[in-house]
Structure formats: structure tokens, C-alpha cells
Image (cartoon, helix red, strand yellow):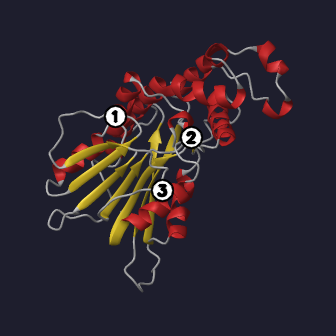
């Protein structure tokens, strides 16, 4: 995940968006920070948070487990300085080989789609090697994927088109945003046992009738609106050589000159925003939570049902 390859913003607005996103995810998870079977009675000795972002999750884990040494890494030093004494932030490129003096009892990733050339090779394999036997790996991830259970999402509308084009652009630059659905397989291939997955539905706006889900949808709508331009500009520029002005308002002349292999729709972000806030569209983002354990020597895996 070299800095030149990271295709998303890294500024104050993005920091605020990440904090909002973290709050929304914790609310979606019913207040839970993790799903692996960690215990306060026997807390993890060493914990690693990969691609920590603002560090909010790592700080909360440090407060929850004061005897645990929490290491959190990211490409950018955007984390606060006033943190629990057991929490340490380091600027590191997690796609490079890991080098830690002690094994970890728990390793965590959250929302890293678009960060890696290969989640399996760069993250899952290294997590497996870095955990002590019996240690847990957990990923809380979502893709650039939008779904609807009632056909209210226009399949060829601006919103669905944006998601398709983001995925296509990310594949062109070698940083796929469509990873979460394959994380479970990456865990299994890396050698983890007790691998379990649970999928949550995050509404894209305030369309649900349930008050809790309606509030979540409004949070996610704001999250999406705050990040839409930033998500789009770098990816579409690198993949299709589109300028910010062309991405925001379209450019028919520019579009007609593109080779057919790179000819995407004349997508305009103003139209994407219009569909995003339309509560007649009952769409959601699937959020995947996957946990897996590093086996003890000679241990055989027993397939497990999804966790509660």
C-alpha cells in the first residue's frame, strides 16, 4: 500500500468522515467493537490494528483492555496524541513484510477495500504468521457494492453505475474495492480455523421504517456524501484520465474520444448524489465481519456456523 498507490483522500475532511464511519459501524454492530471471543478475564497480551486510520478503534480497545499492548499502524500519522498509555501508533506500510519482536494474540482490520493488491498475500498470510497459536484475526469490511431486496434500486441508474465504475477503476489500478466478499476464502486459504462470517446490512439513507436503522441510514448517507468526490477523483483520474470537472459534471466531447475499452458512462456525481438521498431507493451496503483462529500445532479444523 505505497502512498502513491493509495487512491483515497487523506485530509481533514476525510478524517472527519472516517470518525463518522466508525461511529456508524459500531452502531450497526450493536455497540460491539469486535466479535472474536476476547475476554477481559484473560485479555490479549498484544493486539495489532492494521491500517488504523484515525485510530479511534485502537484507542477504544486500549481503554477496554488496559493491560493489553495495542499497536496500530497506518500510512499517515493522523491519529491523536492524547491516547491511553498502552496504545502506540506507528507509520508503516502494511503491504510490506511485517517485522514484530513479539507475536500477537489478536489482529484486526476494518474497511480496507482498495488498500491492497492482494488481501490474502499481503494481510491474511502475514497475520497468520504473526499471530501466536490460538490467536484470532478479525476483519470488518465492506465492498463498493450496493444491493436492494425489493428491486427499488435502478440497475442502470447513476448510483448503481457509480459502484460498477468504482470497481472497474480499482481493478485497472490494481487496488480492488471488491474484496470483502472474498475475505472468508482468504482466511481459509491462509490456514485459519474456526472461520466464521456474519453479514450486516447498512442502509444508504434514511429509507428504513425502523428508527434505529433509519438513523443508521442517515449517518451513512452523510458518510457517503462527505466521501463521494474524494472516492471518485483519484480512481477515475488514474484509471480513465478524467479531470475533477469531468467527473463532477461530465464531458461529452471527452467521452467520445475515449477508446471503446475505456469508455465508461458519462457519469455525473450530481446525479449520483440525487439518487443517494432518494428514500424511494431501498438500498444497502453489505458489511462483512469475518473471524478466524490460528490453529495449534496438529489441530484439525471443524467447520463452524456463523457467529451471533
Q: Residue at x 39, y 77 (%)?
A: 295
Give residue 123's mark.
3
Establish if 56 lies above or below 157.
below
Residue 60 lies, in percent from the top left, at 22, 45
Residue 180 lies, in percent from the top left, at 52, 51
Which one is nearer the viewer's eye here, 26 or 61?
Answer: 61
**Whether residue 188 can be seen here:** yes
Establish if 114 lies above or below 224.
below
SS assignment at label 1: loop
Q: Quadrant of residue 77?
A: top left
Q: Residue at x 14, y 53 (%)?
A: 66
The reply, left or right, for residue 246 in relation to residue 282 is right
Q: Quadrant of residue 81?
A: top left
Gap between marks 3 and 2 measured at Cα: 19 Å
The reply, left or right, for residue 244 in relation to residue 91 is right
Answer with mark 3 or mark 1, whichever residue precedes in sequence: 1
Establish if 305 lies above or below 202.
below
**Whether residue 154 can be seen here:** no
- To which residue does mark 1 refer? 77
SS assignment at label 3: helix
Residue 130 lies, in percent from the top left, at 38, 64
- To which residue does mark 2 refer? 144
The reply, left or right, for residue 154 in relation to residue 221 is right
Amino acid at each position: 500500500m505505497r502512498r502513491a498507490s493509495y487512491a483515497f483522500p487523506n485530509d481533514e475532511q476525510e478524517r472527519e468522515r472516517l470518525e463518522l464511519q466508525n461511529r456508524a459501524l459500531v452502531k450497526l454492530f450493536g455497540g460491539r467493537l469486535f466479535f472474536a471471543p476476547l475476554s477481559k478475564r484473560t485479555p490479549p497480551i498484544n493486539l495489532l490494528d492494521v491500517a488504523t486510520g484515525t485510530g479511534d478503534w485502537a484507542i477504544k480497545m486500549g481503554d477496554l483492555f488496559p493491560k493489553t499492548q495495542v499497536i496500530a499502524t497506518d500510512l499517515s500519522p493522523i491519529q491523536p496524541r492524547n491516547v491511553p498509555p498502552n496504545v502506540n501508533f506507528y507509520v508503516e506500510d502494511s503491504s510490506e513484510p511485517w517485522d514484530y519482536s513479539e507475536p500477537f494474540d489478536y489482529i484486526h482490520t476494518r474497511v480496507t477495500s482498495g488498500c491492497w493488491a492482494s488481501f490474502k498475500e499481503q494481510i491474511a498470510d502475514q497475520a497468520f504468521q504473526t499471530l501466536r497459536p490460538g490467536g484470532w484475526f478479525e476483519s470488518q469490511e465492506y465492498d463498493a457494492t450496493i444491493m436492494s431486496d425489493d428491486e427499488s434500486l435502478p440497475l442502470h441508474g447513476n448510483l448503481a453505475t457509480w459502484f460498477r465504475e468504482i470497481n472497474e477503476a480499482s481493478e485497472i489500478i490494481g487496488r480492488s474495492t471488491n474484496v470483502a466478499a472474498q475475505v472468508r476464502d482468504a482466511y481459509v486459504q491462509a490456514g485459519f480455523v474456526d472461520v466464521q462470517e456474519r453479514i450486516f446490512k447498512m442502509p444508504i439513507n434514511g429509507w428504513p421504517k425502523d428508527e434505529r436503522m433509519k438513523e443508521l441510514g442517515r449517518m451513512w448517507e452523510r458518510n457517503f456524501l462527505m466521501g463521494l468526490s474524494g472516492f471518485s477523483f483519484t480512481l477515475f483520474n488514474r484509471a480513465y484520465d478524467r479531470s475533477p470537472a469531468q467527473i463532477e459534471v461530465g464531458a461529452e466531447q471527452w467521452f467520445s474520444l475515449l477508446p471503446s475499452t475505456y469508455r465508461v458512462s458519462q457519469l455525473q456525481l450530481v446525479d449520483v448524489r440525487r439518487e443517494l438521498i432518494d428514500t424511494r431507493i431501498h438500498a444497502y451496503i453489505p458489511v462483512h465481519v469475518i473471524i478466524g483462529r490460528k490453529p495449534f500445532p496438529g489441530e484439525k479444523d471443524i467447520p463452524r456456523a456463523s457467529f451471533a
